[in-house]
């Protein structure tokens, strides 16, 4: 009976370390990111000084062990930080999200000790990483990629192109997926670590996007790109496993980003509706407005619980594939719905760039598209339910 009555922490109940990082990330976002959000959005470029501040704050290597100059934190701590940064700006949120949940996680889970020693300290302290899987003809069908890798002495020669690569403009370290044996299908896919100054590697067209405009999204070109064999991440022909497992974790990060976008939208709506007066009273006094705010808050809480649950499962070594898909799917739906309602509550002001909800609305849309579309998440969930 004593065990049965023991207190079990709520999903939103954080440890002291998690609270400290949450508060530090929130303060950093409010103090240093918020004043630059509009300028970065209009310029479609991250502020260079801000990038360095992310490293100085330890936000680019949260889960990297201290022996590799990282924060020695947990996956859940990364999720909490991504949410807080995204409350203020989704572009900087995905900037640190890709670094932590995709690039760093791939190295932590698949790299040899030698590769970890060479690259993790750089990723923790000074160099941005990018994850290069998608191609012009390989989006949801990611493993139909055409980029090839051919063995040549002590190197591999890579040829092909990659599309929609987040952080490409800022990155120095690229995790590139190519096929060493196309006849073997997905079992020929291999993950390669490519540095920006490698021969035959270049960053090409930068996309002009609807939302998350300050986050760079570029095409990558590989033209006889020479990569040393020691820069294979994991085993040759096992790149598909690296991709699948890393993306499963990454979807939780996108869920956290979308929760942040939704929360930022609600925060703005709460402030505005209490300040805006019509008919001699704040519009928050009207029941119709109150009901909308209540629905927004309830939606956000359900999304946050799904994201936190998936993150806790992953951190505890439990199966989390279905939960990650649910979290990413639902959080992206919520972000779009909540940000749209926030625009409605702002009225005409919600449609102009002077007020923040217009940007939240634009930023929210990407959540249903990248790191697996909403339809792909539903497909994953259904398969796991019916197996």
Image: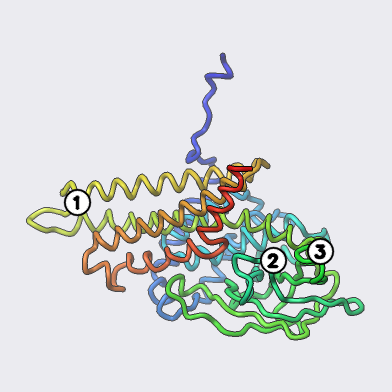
Q: Position of residue 94 (x, y in %)?
A: 53, 64
Q: Quadrant of the N terminus?
A: top right
Task: Determine the residue located farthest toward the top in the rendered image.
Answer: 1
* In this view, the mark in front (2 or 3): 2
- Please name the residue that numbered disc 1 is placed on: 284
Query: Quick check: marks 3 and 1 in contact, CB under 8 Å?
Result: no
Which residue is rendered at x = 27% and y = 53% of the image?
270
- Please name the residue that numbered disc 3 is placed on: 237
* In this view, the mark in front (1 or 2): 2
Label located before the other in sequence (3 or 1)? 3
Q: Secondary structure at mark 2?
A: helix
Distance (Cα) linking label 1 and label 2: 50 Å
Q: Position of residue 257 (x, y in %)?
A: 49, 58
Q: Quadrant of the C terminus?
A: top right
From where the camera sits, is residue 333 visible? yes
From where the camera sits, is residue 32 visible? no
Distance (Cα) linking label 3 and label 1: 58 Å
* In this view, the mark in front (3 or 1): 3
Q: Nearer the viewer, residue 272 or 188?
A: 188
Q: Position of residue 33 (x, y in %)?
A: 44, 67
Label located before the other in sequence (1 or 2)? 2
Q: Secondary structure at mark 3?
A: loop
Q: Is residue 110 left or right of residue 20?
A: right
Q: Secondary structure at mark 1?
A: helix
Q: Is residue 12 left or right of residue 358?
A: right
Task: Determine the residue located farthest toward the right in the rendered image.
Answer: 153
- Please name the residue that numbered disc 2 is placed on: 143
Query: Quick check: marks 1 and 2 in contact, CB under 8 Å?
Result: no
Quadrant of the rendered image containing residue 57 = bottom right
Which residue is rendered at x = 60% and y = 62% of the image?
60
């Amino acid at each position: 009976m004593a065990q049965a009555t023991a207190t079990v922490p709520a999903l939103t109940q954080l440890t002291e370390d998690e609270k400290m990082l949450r508060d530090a990330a929130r303060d950093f976002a409010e103090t240093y990111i918020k004043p630059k959000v509009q300028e970065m959005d209009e310029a479609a470029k991250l502020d260079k000084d801000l990038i360095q501040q992310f490293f100085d704050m330890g936000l680019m290597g949260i889960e990297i062990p201290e022996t590799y100059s990282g924060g020695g934190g947990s996956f859940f701590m990364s999720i909490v930080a991504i949410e807080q940064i995204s409350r203020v700006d989704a572009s900087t949120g995905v900037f640190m999200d890709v670094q932590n949940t995709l690039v760093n996680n791939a190295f932590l889970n698949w790299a040899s000790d030698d590769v970890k020693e060479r690259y993790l300290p750089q990723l923790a302290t000074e160099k941005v990483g990018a994850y290069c899987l998608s191609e012009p003809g390989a989006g949801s069908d990611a493993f139909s990629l055409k980029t090839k890798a051919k063995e040549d002495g002590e190197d591999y020669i890579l040829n092909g192109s990659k599309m929609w690569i987040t952080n490409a403009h800022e990155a120095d370290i690229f995790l590139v997926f190519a096929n060493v044996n196309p006849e073997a299908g997905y079992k020929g896919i291999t993950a390669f670590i490519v540095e920006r100054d490698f021969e035959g590697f270049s960053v090409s067209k930068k996309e002009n996007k609807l939302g998350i405009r300050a986050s760079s999204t570029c095409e990558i070109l590989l033209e006889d790109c020479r990569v040393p064999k020691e820069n294979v991440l994991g085993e040759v022909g096992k790149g598909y496993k690296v991709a699948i497992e890393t993306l499963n974790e990454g979807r939780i990060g996108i869920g956290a980003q979308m929760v942040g976008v939704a929360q930022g939208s609600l925060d703005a709506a709460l402030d505005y509706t209490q300040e805006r007066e019509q008919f001699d009273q704040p519009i928050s006094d009207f029941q119709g407005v109150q009901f909308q705010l209540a629905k927004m808050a309830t939606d956000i809480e359900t999304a946050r619980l799904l994201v936190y649950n998936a993150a806790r499962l992953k951190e505890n070594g439990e199966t989390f594939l279905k939960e990650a898909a649910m979290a990413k799917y639902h959080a992206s739906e919520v972000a779009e719905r909540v940000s749209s309602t926030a625009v409605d509550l702002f009225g005409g002001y919600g449609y102009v760039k002077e007020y923040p909800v217009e940007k939240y609305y634009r930023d929210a849309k990407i959540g249903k598209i990248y790191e697996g579309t909403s339809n792909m998440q539903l497909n994953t969930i259904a398969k796991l339910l019916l197996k």
